[in-house]
Image (tube, rainbow, N blue to C red):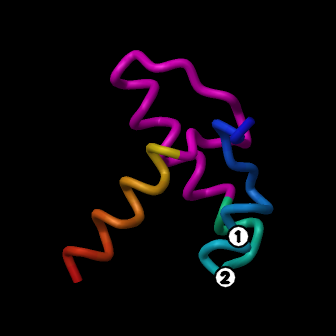
Amino acid sequence: MEKLFLTSNEVADLLNISQQQAYKIIRDMNKQLAEHGFLILRGRINKKYFMEQIYKSKEGE
């Protein structure tokens, strides 16, 4: 079964950044999700939402 959420370690590895930076990204994305009424897990981010946001920002470059 595929995991639905990414941890800060996984985000840090995917983006090649520090774990502290990954926590900030997760916090910001979770804030956006919470504003839209979604359930969030502290320190984890929905994998699908994360990938959509990352690729959306890369397309804008």
Can residue 15 be found in the magenta stretch? no
Quadrant for the C terminus in the image: bottom left
The image shows residue 52 at horizontal and vertical percentages of 37, 53
Mark 2 element type:
loop
Can residue 28 be found in the magenta stretch? yes
Per the rendering, the mark at residue 36 is none
Q: Which residue is drawn at 67% across and 79% down?
A: 17
Mark 1 element type:
helix
Classify 10 Å Cα crowding around label 1: few (below 14), some (14-19), many (20 and above). Answer: some
Q: Which residue is drawn at 23% across and 75% down?
A: 59
Number of labels in the image equals 2
How far apart in space, not on screen, are marks 1 and 2 (Cα)?
A: 6 Å
- Identify the amino acid type marked 2: Asn
The image shows residue 47 at horizontal and vertical percentages of 56, 46
Which quadrant would residue 41 be assigned to in this image? top right
Q: Image check: 22 left or right of 56?
A: right
Per the rendering, the mark at residue 12 is 1
Query: What span is in magenta?
Result: 23-47
- Seen in the picture, residue 49 relative to 25 is either above or below; the reply is above
Are the residues flagged by discs 1 and 2 in contact, CB closer than 8 Å?
Answer: yes
- Identify the amino acid type marked 1: Ala
Which residue position holds label 2?
16
Q: Residue at x 61, y 57 (%)?
A: 24
